[in-house]
Amino acid sequence: DTAVSQTPKYLVTQMGNDKSIKCEQNLGHDTMYWYKQDSKKFLKIMFSYNNKELIINETVPNRFSPKSPDKAHLNLHINSLELGDSAVYFCASSQDGRGDEQFFGPGTRLTVL
Amino acid sequence: GNSVTQMEGPVTLSEEAFLTINCTYTATGYPSLFWYVQYPGEGLQLLLKATKADDKGSNKGFEATYRKETTSFHLEKGSVQVSDSAVYFCALLYGNKLVFGAGTILRVKS
């Protein structure tokens, strides 16, 4: 029974396309996150939602838009994909908005050609 | 600013060797500190944490002690196994954000 799940696992697409990545958690947590991991394994926070409210919004191009329909789901939509968007995107969740003890999904590897 | 510095990898060890992965941090105040582990093809998992100075976090034979005087949180294990091969991330909690180090690849050979 997967705690934090993401779909799809792999995503290969052309420059300029629009794509979405979905995340769901069944832990009953209030807070969810999106991270980007680059090719050197460096991991950086992008966004966080607490009970459907945006609480962290790092310096990310506005082509990236998170959406949280309810506290168990956090989706990431990316417009006009660029080569530099190629990375692994991780969703995570935590009990509350303090950011302590985060549970990560398996990641979505996005490749932009 | 707040940052985490880890020793560069990869670290290659033989099975049953002693492991140390160094981690130092720069932060305002006294943040909580974490080690996360990422096995091949998987997401990160919390390995251990410490919330205040002199706390020792431990799990699965791994240990790390929060050293305020040296701003360090080094990860140690007395005897590594092949199954410990993974990427290890040191992190601090600043406000409600986790700030990660660059990760250290550990390879354990049988």
Image: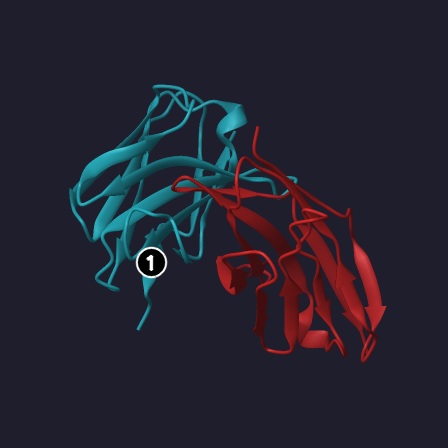
Residue B87 in the figure: left or right of residue B96: right
Residue B87, image x and y in percent? 65, 57
Residue A74 in the figure: left or right of residue A109: left
Image point (57%, 64%), residue name: B55
Image point (74%, 53%), residue name: B22
Element type where label 1 sits in the image: strand
Rendered position, B40 above or below A23: below
Q: Quadrant of residue A89?
A: top left
Residue B90, image x and y in percent? 61, 51
Q: Identify the amino acid type marked 1.
A: Ser
Q: As drawn, which residue projects farthest toward the left?
A: A70
Residue A12, image x and y in percent? 45, 39
Rendered position, A41 above or below B84: above
In which chain is the residue bearing label 1? Answer: A
What is the quadrant of the N terminus of chain A in the image? Answer: bottom left
Q: Nearer the viewer, residue B23 or B105?
A: B23
Mark 1, other Cα within 10 Å: few <14 / some 14–19 / many ≥20: many
Q: Nearer the viewer, residue A46 or B33?
A: B33
Q: Quadrant of residue B54?
A: bottom right
Question: Judging from the image, what is the letter of the chain drawn in red?
Answer: B
Total numbered labels placed on residues in the image: 1
Residue A104 visible? The answer is no
Residue A48 in the figure: left or right of residue B6: left
Q: Which residue is mark 1?
A: A5
Q: Nearer the viewer, residue B47 or A9?
A: B47
Question: Judging from the image, what is the letter of the chain drawn in cyan?
Answer: A
Q: Nearer the viewer, residue B67 or A113?
A: B67
